[in-house]
Image (cartoon, helix red, strand yellow):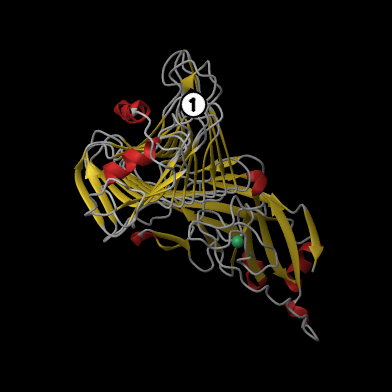
Amino acid sequence: MLKGLGIVLVVCALAPATALAGDYYVTQAGTGTACTNSSTPCDLATALGQANVALGPNTVHITGPLSLTGLSPLAVGNPTPGSSVSLVGSGSGAGGTSLSGSVVLGVGPGSSVSHLALQGSSTALVMALGSSVDDVVATTTGTVSPAVVIVGATGPGDATISHSVISSPMTSATPALVTGGDTTHRTIVSDSRITGGGFGVAEVPVISPVAAVKGAHITRTVIDAGLVGFAAAGTDSSISDSVIHVRTPGGAGVSVLPTLSIGEQPHADVLQDTIIGPDDLGSNGVLVQSAGPGFRPGSATVTGSIVRGWDTGVNVQPPAAVGFASGSATATLSDFDDVVSGSANLAVDPRFVDASSEDYRLASGSPMIDAAGTAPANGETDLAGNDRVTDGNGDGTAARDMGAFESPGVAPHAQPQPPAAPAPKKRVAVFTLKLPHGTLTFGNGRIVLFNVGCPKRLSFGCRVTVTLRGVVHSSRSRTIKLGTGRAITFPGAHAKVRIRLTRKAASLITRGKLRKVTAQVVGQDAAGATAKPKRTYRIRYRRARRH
Ligand SMILES: [Ca+2]
């Protein structure tokens, strides 16, 4: 990948020329030499050669379909005279501009490329810090080079990639996109799609004595990767409003790499993402790798995300050997296969529209809707371009949905009108119960059921509601299905049980006939056989109030 550095150096070595700044024109049949005249367009290499060395800013227009193959590296921009070049193709799709070869384009600082397709037998696009691309399809057909690489040890600005498609073969072992940064500049990716066999996106770890390298910011992007979706090594990497889909056993959605201990601690923010794994042993939704001697382990925060199909949702890797150190991670307002400790995390079926066809939008009634808090959105829209913070459940409060997609807002439900003359038997007493503190974990249950044992004598008037981490599960039966998975953990401080009884039933309590009920969690194995109840809690009423 370091061969890409040569592209920028070639740009710098070009001799200054006397061409005027302004617009340059290219067509498939262009043969002129005065490229600033649209009536006598040039070929691409000639136009870029003139624009790169003229005081700018300059724009190279490609008009009409253009297809060039076997290109040697072409440079866009030249920092030496202080000019910038915008190369504007005639479209990234069929009938647009298509360039292919070995290393196809190198984009210098301050310059940009848009509306074209690049296909490289090795790297297709090399970008300097401070350059940008928009509506570019960059593909490599090789399996040993990234499709796109960001290079440059210092600014002058961020490298930005928007509305673009970056892909390498699924048989590739290298990242599709290798990002770059310095102490003040980073790589910014938005509204794009990245496909890679080994890694989707990888940041180069700090392997030289650099105090801190800014991490990539990725938003509203789909990463479809073989082994790792996003390998993060910057001091403030982030991925938000995005989908990561990893397909290889043992893979990871986001992996935070250790860096040299001389640098700042690497950190990754995982915010409002949907991270889907291969559902196999040893895979990790978010992995914080341990660090060997001389290296520093990173940290990760997971917020408002759906992390499903992983052996472990959030894995802070234990020390891999003697002398290794572990990093840290926190998770809040997120949904996992198994409940992860933290604040307001869930382990319930997110109810995607159609996971089998990889449609990870939320179905109507999904428990992910409005479950990720009322904090302001990262950006104005979700991955699909819909408004981000909506009232999706009609309770009158706009809140984030978990995951990359926000459900449309619905009109607040009308407040129920009290009946004119409520029958006494409809009135209820509500008792809020609380599970004892502690953690309850099942290692082999495939289906976890929560049984609240309404005593038989009260079964005529017992309705059970279990509120687990803010999500209400209600049933007239005595069994509530809470989720599936290899294991499920109920942190006691967040699990509440409500038993709604008729007044007649409640009178038994007020008269001291019943002082406690039993809540019971039962594991069920893959064959459907109900295992013995793992534990039974005796639950005492903490308080009672009448409604
Ligand atoms: Ca919402």
- Above or below, 461 relative to 157: below
Side of 394 where 46 appears, left or right? left
Residue tagged 1: 154
Q: Position of residue 6 (x, y in %)?
A: 31, 27
- Asked which quadrant contains residue 252, the reply is top left
- Above or below, 404 relative to 323: below
Q: Position of residue 151 (x, y in %)?
A: 40, 30
Visible in this render: residue 157? yes
Tell me which residue sits at (28%, 37%) in the image.
Answer: 123
Q: Quadrant of the C terminus?
A: bottom right
Q: Quadrant of the N terminus?
A: top left
Tell me which residue sits at (29%, 27%) in the image.
Answer: 3
Tell me which residue sits at (25%, 48%) in the image.
Answer: 43
- Asked which quadrant contains residue 280, the reply is top left
* Residue nearest the observer in this picture, 317 or 28: 28
Q: Position of residue 261 (x, y in %)?
A: 51, 16
* Residue nearest the observer in this picture, 98 or 1: 98
* Residue nearest the observer in this picture, 145 or 307: 145
Looking at the rendered structure, the secondary structure element under dot 1 is loop
Tell me which residue sits at (79%, 59%) in the image.
Answer: 544
Q: Residues within 10 Å of mark 1 (few under 14, many from 20)?
A: some
What amino acid is labelled 1 in the image? Thr
**Which residue of the protein is positioned furthest toward the left in this rendering?**
70
* Residue nearest the observer in this picture, 7 or 24: 24
Q: Which of the four quarters of the rendered structure image does ligand 1 lie in? A: bottom right
